Amino acid sequence: MSKLKLATVWLDGCSGCHMSFLDMDERLLALAELVDVVYSPIVDTKEFPDQVDIALVEGAVASVDDEKKIKKIRAHSKLLVAMGDCAIAGNVPSMRNPIGPTAILERAYIENADEQQQIPCIVVPQLLRTVRPIHEFVKVDVYLPGCPPSADTFHTALTALVTGEPLDIPALTRFGA
Amino acid sequence: MSATVDVKTLVIDGENVSARAGQTILEVAKENGIEIPTLCHLDGLTDVGACRLCMVEIKGLNKLLPACVATVEEGMEVTTKSERLLKHRRTILEMLFAERNHICSVCVANGNCELQALAQSQGVTHVRLPYRNPELTVDASHERFTADHNRCILCTRCVRVCAEVEGAHVWDLMGRGIDTMIISDLHENWGSSSCTRCGKCVQACPTGALFDKSKIGADQPKNPDFLPYLNMMREAQ
């Protein structure tokens, strides 16, 4: 049996979900028997592959770049998993929403900067007006809440998704878990 | 002398139960170990039927009734769990999450929040409605407590506990509909209001909207269980 292709993606989040994923420790070895990690911040692949079976997405959509990425991920993934509260609900990155990106950038790069007061605009992508969950842009198949979801949650959920066993997510985790 | 008790018999979730006339469906269900999700209800306070989470189906009746205020009737057939009810309960919870800024991971009530726990028990894993992201204030003017309107769900438990149990009626509502705000006195800062500093509203608050400044994170369990006992002891006097 050929292994399933697993991708993990990091949008506007803190990487905590990826750390928790790695926190599965030795169980990662068992998981590696079932899946190939074809794209991830922890592997050296630059482009999102054409065919991915399971894509785990951490982080909310906060910039034009995130929006482009999530649409590409959806187009090339069979199963899209919103991993953690940022992807699902915006979470901490969305705390800028009531204030707006202009005010945030001005506070960080102008008011609080002692030298070279300027808002970065080259190379870095433009911020969207609000930070939003990924399901407001693309169809999401599985929601795995938590900040971050625990290693046990990852293990149970991924095992179920790979083997096709039933998965009761509210029994495993919740918002803010 | 023995006063005759007006007994009503009814069916809740297929179970034959008996109740006293005037009891609410919620009370009778609870007495019989049948759980109905609630949010604005708090034992020891009057009920207002505001949150609509306790809606139940009554056989022969088209509309749903809030179990916390609907009283039992002879021969009533009540259903507390169904696909239809679950759908409505989930939608209500999603609307509450979308209405204000509930960031569970950084909330003082994370792990001790009734809204968060209900989302989990009712199977809400995401909110289908767009978030409103309103700009709301945090009133930290009180020496002991803080009111964070980002987390308020307008259940009015604070209003009722302050008026009915403490007798101070510091809290009340201002505005209508989605713009409604909890205010202290006539929209004063909490710190300069007529607050008696008893802290009952903090214990009654189901979320992180009202909290004790000296406690953070997991150190913030709410304990409103004293209310029915306080009422009972007062009545006994």
Image: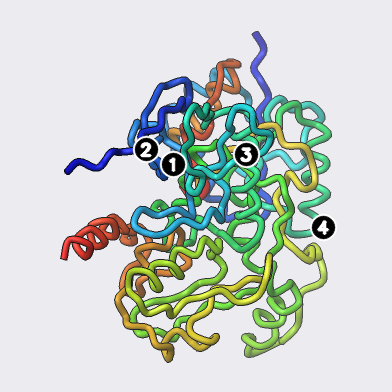
- The answer for which chain carries disc 3 is B
In 3D space, how far apart are the residues under numbered discs 1 and 2 (Cα atoms)? 6 Å
Where B156 falls versus A74 (above or below)?
below
Where in the figure is residue B201, as x and y percent of width and height? Answer: 38, 69
Instruction: Give the CA distance from mark 4 to mark 2.
Output: 51 Å
| Residue B26 marker | 1
Q: Residues within 10 Å of mark 1 (few under 14, many from 20)?
A: many
- Say which residue label 4 marks: A64
Earlier sequence position, callout 1 versus callout 3: 1
**What mark, if any, has residue B64 been given in the picture?**
3
> Which residue occupies the foreground of this view, A139 or B102?
B102
Nearest to the eye among marks 4 and 2: give it. Answer: 2
Whichever of labels 2 and 3 marks the residue nearer the N terminus, that label is 2
Residue A22 can be seen, yes or no: no
Q: Residue at x 77, y 48 (%)?
A: A136
* Quadrant that contains the C terminus of chain B: bottom left
